[in-house]
Amino acid sequence: MKPAFIVTVHQSAQYRPNGHALLDTYISSLSDNLKLEYDLFILENASENPYTFPKNSHYRYFPDQQGGMTRCWNEGVRMAIENGNDVFCVTNEDLIFNDTINNLFRVIEAHSERDRSVYGPICDNRTTFPPQRRNTCSHTIRDITGNQYPIHGWFTAFNKEYYNTYNVNGNIFDPALKWRKQECFQENNWKKGAKSFVVDSCLVHHEHIGSWRKPEKIIK
């Protein structure tokens, strides 16, 4: 297993002045804690000054934000597939990892439902969806298929078989939903036999800054 971490970033005085600083923390906390070999895919939406990305990462810069976060996520998954990765973690950049991130991949690798499932960690931020809102880890895996709240969009993980089964015209995320409700792909795929699981042994901190709401009001 060689996971891909797909992360979108934007920095500008108008929308997200600390975008690159958040990504720095994301990258360092991931590097310090994940024991598996992995690949990093950075998708940048029209920052005022492009990010100085690590040499061992994959990078693409979009000169505008017309496609929103969704364009970045879909493109990142495609890049990871072309690169040969087999598990895709699609994320925001305002995350901080610890060593429990390793548990996520242990669960996915051993899980009998892995080829049709989306996985998410727990989070200690009160703004995350209720099924994932936890302060401490446990050794359970919870099936939330059909729940009012699917896996929250700041971190969704799925494998290549899931992509092959459920992509629509090469996209997992609906391109028409540029900024919000990207979680709807799970609800659509539940009707086709897919599932969603919360991995209680993996806790990821999410700052949940939510500054994407600013360009959403302007960029259509």
Image (cartoon, grey):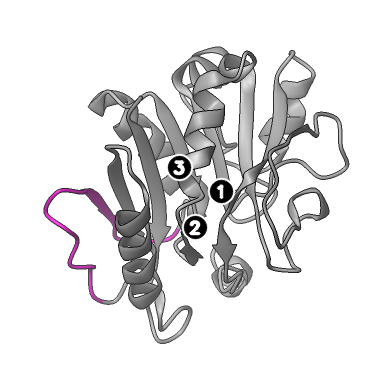
Question: How many numbered circles does the render carry?
Answer: 3
Q: Secondary structure at mark 2?
A: loop
- Marks 1, 3: nearer the viewer: 3
Q: Position of residue 77 (x, y in %)?
A: 40, 34
Figure check: 74 above or below 40: above
Amino acid type, mark 2: Asn
Residue of label 2 = 92
Residue of label 3 = 102
Among the 4 quarters of the image, the one containing residue 102 = top left
Earlier sequence position, callout 3 versus callout 2: 2
Question: What distance separates the C-alpha of mark 1 from that of mark 2?
Answer: 7 Å
- Magenta: main secondary structure: loop
Q: Position of residue 66 (x, y in %)?
A: 46, 56
> Could you tell me which quadrant the N terminus lies in?
top left
Amino acid type, mark 3: Asn
Residue of label 1 = 155
Earlier sequence position, callout 1 versus callout 2: 2
Amino acid type, mark 1: Phe
User: Local crowd at mark 1 within 10 Å, few (<14), some, or many (≥20)?
Assistant: many
- Nearest the viewer among 122 and 52 is 122
**Magenta highlight range:** 49-65
